[in-house]
Image (cartoon, grey):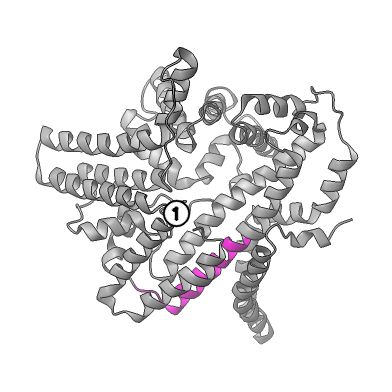
Amino acid sequence: MVFSSFAFLLVFFPLHMLAYLLVPEKLKNPVLLASSLVFYAWGGPRFVILIVSEALASWFFALRIEASEGGLRRLWLIAELACLLGLLGYFKYWTFILANTHSLFGVPAEIPSIVLPIGISFYTFQLISYVVDVYRGSIAAQPSYGKLLLYCSLFHQCIAGPIVRYETVAAEIDHRSASERDIYEGVRRFSIGLAKKVVLANSCAAVVDSLLPIGSPALATQAMSGYWLGMVFYALQIYLDFSAYSDMAIGMGRMIGFHYLENFDHPYQCSSVQDFWRRWHISLSSFFRDYVYFPLGGSRCSRTEYIRNMAVVWFLTGLWHGASWNYILWGLYFLGFLLLERFVIQDRLPKPLSHLSALLVVLVGWVLFKFESFADLGSVLAGMIGANGAGFTNLAVHTVFLQNIFLLAASMLACTGFGPWLRTRLSSLAGTGDSAVRLFGALEMLTPPLLLLVSLAALAGASYNPFIYFQF
């Protein structure tokens, strides 16, 4: 089950909220836990055992760490990390490892098929952060197993993030409340995320599929402008899709009193590649910073050690996104540009040029991210520089562009901070008179239901693109 489905929107979530709001305070956590496990089981019932077991191991090891002293604490931590990382490695990377040994050495003769449990990367990292923080003494171990299981299985964010630190929600697991303002802001944020996903991101994905059909012979014969247009739409799609799930998670948490941290900060407004990564998937970047980069020595070391630390972080960043060489290449690609900015470019570029060059680096990076097949990857990279002999443009690309020009404009606008700025501006103007107050109030009242209706219409139409009716 995903947030952008009728099953979730019309059945699961309304029933969950009804039960949550009706039960007394002492039963709210049990209802939330039951809903979370049902939600998780929807996509793979047998894997509920895995998340329950990982939470149990983390609960046990954290308590042992807190109760121990000296070297024994480190042994408990190592045991916990071996447990969690071992399971993550088996389910997510073992098939990838065996496929490579098979290609190189012919062993094993058959590669087993291992189903990847939904959300394992997210809840594993959350539990790692929890136990490491207990080891460091920055938080107290949670004595209740049920509350720890609730923390790592919260259906708002256990599937697609953000990666929520235990310290962020520890107090709210025990004591939380949601005011009318919280509920409104939560519904509004959820409706914005849903519209970003089903209206914009899904429509962008349809354009990408038409211009860049993976595995198709047509991919190698696309016109140069078709590759660039397709990758621009893909860059929009991946941001709108991923940030939409964070919006919906933050919104659902706000409705019941949880305050998750922001996960995206308009990354395409970045001033450099480094700035892009300060703004993109903030919870993942901060995880690797705090639990890998700083323990390795951070930047307070020699240049060689700094480069080593960065290489480890960016290798792991690429690998985290998927068990395929293109993701590793994608991580190392960004490593190269981050080192280039630090040691060569520094602050020498004018801001407009630095912004444009960062966007170009990110866009080419998305090519590495999207295409797992090196044959497809090579075709697209060659086509983007006009080396495939298909020419600069053609009628098909021109038609796709004109049909989707308003979708392109709306998606680009949604990637900026224009919406929050406009709301702030209208809010300030509301203090200038009764008419302005009524206008702002009407917009605030109508925005969530209108976005929800448009989103449901888009879902009902599957690949429905409302912008197709506005074209040249």
Q: Secondary structure at mark 1?
A: loop
Note whether 456 is above or below 292 in the view shown.
below
191 falls in the magenta region: yes
From which residue to which does the magenta span run? 177-195
The answer to whether residue 82 of the structure is visible from this angle is: yes
Q: Is residue 395 left or right of residue 64?
A: right
Q: Position of residue 15 (x, y in %)?
A: 44, 74
Q: Amino acid at mark 1?
A: Gly
Please give the residue where the numbered disc 1 appears in the rendered image.
43
Tell me which residue sits at (65%, 76%) in the image. Answer: 443
Where, by quadrant of the figure, is residue 353 drawn?
top right
Magenta-colored segment: predominant secondary structure = helix
Q: Is residue 420 above or below residue 379?
A: below
Q: Tell me which residue sits at (71%, 29%) in the image.
A: 380
Q: Nearer the viewer, residue 16 or 318?
A: 16
Q: Which residue is painted at 82% across and 47% down in the image? A: 400
Res 374 quadrant in image = top right
Q: Relative to 224, say whether 62 is above or below.
A: below
Is 386 placed left or right of 13 in the picture? right
- Residue 153 left/right relative to 387: left
